[in-house]
């Protein structure tokens, strides 16, 4: 996969991230791989927190925000831009 395809596939859930990481251009798509990983970790945390009845509705709102951020990331990857996502754009997990 080239840089653009790697970036787009990375935002499609954790399975898409794994496929992009294994089969994609790791160096060219590192920016989007990192941002998608942060989104995936945030989605997992929100799914775990949604079990708690008091936090359930807040977690649902944050899950919607994560979905919107993923769409923004896909658009950025499709345009070959390295535009950081709001709020989480500065978090770096992959070096």
Image: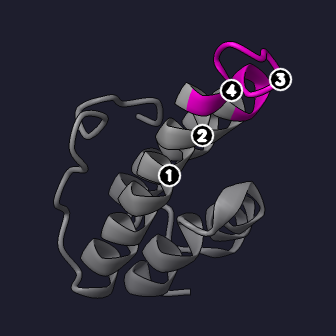
Asked whether the viewer can see residue 44, the reply is yes
Q: CA distance from mark 2 to mark 1?
A: 6 Å
Q: In the image, is residue 54 part of the stretch drawn in magenta?
A: yes
x, y (%) of residue 81?
Answer: 18, 73
Question: Which numbered disc flags the more N-terminal residue, 4 or 3?
Answer: 3
Mark 1 Cα within 10 Å, few/some/many (few <14, many 20+)?
few
- Circles 4 and 3 in contact, beta carbons < 8 Å: yes
Question: Which numbered disc flags the more N-terminal residue, 4 or 1?
Answer: 4
- Circles 2 and 1 in contact, beta carbons < 8 Å: yes
Q: In the image, is residue 51 part of the stretch drawn in magenta?
A: yes
x, y (%) of residue 43?
Answer: 62, 40
- Circles 3 and 1 in contact, beta carbons < 8 Å: no
Question: Which numbered disc flags the more N-terminal residue, 2 or 3?
Answer: 3
- From the viewer's side, name the closer residue of 81 and 39: 39
Using the image, determine if residue 75 lies above or below residue 57: below
Tag on residue 60?
A: 2
Q: What span is in magenta? A: 47-57
Tag on residue 64?
A: 1
x, y (%) of residue 42?
Answer: 56, 33
Tag on residue 51?
A: 3
Residue carrying label 4: 56
* 74 relative to 54 in the view: left or right: left
């Amino acid at each position: 996969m080239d840089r653009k395809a790697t970036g787009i596939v990375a935002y499609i859930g954790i399975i898409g991230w794994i496929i992009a990481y294994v089969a994609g251009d790791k160096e060219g798509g590192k920016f989007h791989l990192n941002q998608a990983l942060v989104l995936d970790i945030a989605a997992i945390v929100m799914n775990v927190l949604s079990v708690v009845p008091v936090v359930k509705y807040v977690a649902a709102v944050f899950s919607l925000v994560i979905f919107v951020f993923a769409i923004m990331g896909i658009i950025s990857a499709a345009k070959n831009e390295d535009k950081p996502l709001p709020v989480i754009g500065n978090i770096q997990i992959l070096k």
